[in-house]
Every structure is written in structure tokens, then in C-alpha cells.
Amino acid sequence: MPPIRDQAVVVTGATGDMGRAIAEMLAREGARLAVSGRDGRKLVELESHLRELGAACVSGVVDVTVEDAVCDFFARAKAVLGPLDVLIHTPGLSIPGSIPAMALTDFQQMLDVNVKGAFLAAKHFAAQVDEAAGGLLINLGSMAARRANPNAPIYCATKAALAMMDEGLALQLAAKNVRVTTIHPGAADTQFWGTRQVPREKFLKVDEIAEVIRFILGVPKRVVIHEIAFESFEFFRGK
């Protein structure tokens, strides 16, 4: 099984609940980390915490929808850590609402964060991978890509678009010795929900999602996992 220890891993959206849990898991496993997020205060605290866990770490405040910022961050990550081995891209945005009543700005913002952001991260990660060593790109999709809901149909559409983009990306990046995996977790107990009244106690825990990612990182490099879909069994069975 390939070790996570000493792998150069980028986690985008690391100041969110899910990104932080993933970064902490990687630090405990001995990875060398580059973490990004939009909240500078949280990012400083996270970098300090990851270093306390023993990880070499570099961080950057990055808006994943701005290409210059994304390009600069990945270039700096490589300058500090060497060629990059893994990207785990987690940012996502949902603005619930009916399509006839939705503002174009809300539609565009979801498209920008959920699709454009993943495109830019993949583009600039691929440029920093050593082809001989290979790489692994993990995008955070959603079960919403597989089943529409009436509350956030545009979010569902953007996650479905991400899944299809990943299928094409996998075909293209295979030539650069980079594997692509899309994970589709169900609803998770995070701040993603804001003030929405949802049964968060029945949702996936962020540490459970981090465990799925740890499994993907542990499979032999001769194996590519294209997709994994999973959710809380308690929520699935409706109890």
C-alpha cells in the first residue's frame, strides 16, 4: 500500500469543516501539506495546528474562482514542497431557491465555485506534478449529482457537471500519469447548512468522509477509483 507519509498533498477549502478534517487526518498520517481557504484568520490557526501535529505545511488565502490566485498558490506549494502528489479539492457552494425566482448572480456564483473552481485547481495542480511519479486528484462531488432535489436544483446541476468534467479530466490526465477520483458523499454535518433546519445529527460526520479519502490514498497506484458514492445509513433508511 503506498504510504501517505511524505506525500505532498494540497487541500483546497481547508478552512471549512470538511477540509479541516481531511487536513488533520493527513497531518497525522505524515503528509506534507499545502492548505488554502478564504478565511485568513482560520487559515493561520489551521497551519499552526497542523504543524503541532507534525506536518510540514504551507498555506495561502485563495479564492478558487480567480485564476492568478490559484496559479500562484500551486506554484508556491511546489516551490516549498517539491512536485505535488495529491490534490483534494473541497470547496462547494449551495444557494437554495426556486429556478424561476433565482437571481442570475446566485446561479453564476454556484457555477463559479463548484465548476470553475474545480477546473482551475485541476489545471494548475496538473502543471506541478512530476509525470514519472504520477499524481492523484480527488474532487468533492455530492450525492446531489445523482439525485435532484426541489430545494437546490442548481447546486445539483453544478455537482453533476463536476462529475462529468472529472470523467473527461480522467481521460486526459491519464497521459500525465495522474489518476482522478470523484467522491460523492451524502449530506454531512457541517456549517454548509447555515441556518437551514435539517437533521444534521443523522448526517455523515466529517471524520467519516476523511476516512474514505484515506482509503483512496491507500490503494496501489496501479488502481484508479473513478467514483465513490456514500452516505449516512441512518439518514438513508429514514430513521
Image (cartoon, rainbow, N blue to C red):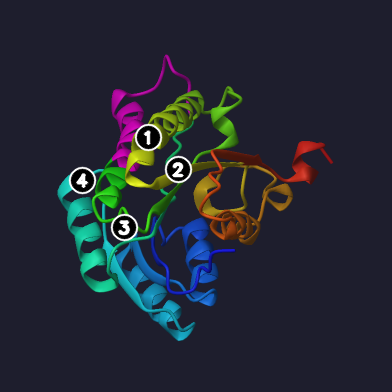
Callouts 2 and 1 close, C-beta under 8 Å? yes
| Front label number (4 vs 1) | 1
Q: CA distance from mark 4 to mark 2?
A: 22 Å
* Amino acid identity at mark 4: Val
In the rendered view, would you say 58 is above or below 174?
below
Q: Is residue 113 visible?
A: no
- Does the magenta-highlighted stretch encompass residue 102? yes
Q: CA distance from mark 4 to mark 3?
A: 12 Å
Horizontally, is 135 left or right of 38 in the view?
right
Instruction: Say how many tags the image has.
Output: 4
Q: Position of residue 137 (x, y in %)?
A: 42, 49
Horizontally, is 203 left or right of 106 in the view?
right
Q: CA distance from mark 4 to mark 1?
A: 20 Å
| Front label number (2 vs 3) | 2
- Mark 2 falls on what kind of element? strand
Residues in magenta? 97-119
Q: Which residue is mark 3?
A: 38
26 or 114: nearer the eye? 26
Q: Which residue is mark 1?
A: 169
Q: Which residue is mark 4?
A: 66
Q: CA distance from mark 2 to mark 3?
A: 25 Å
Q: Which residue is mark 2?
A: 180
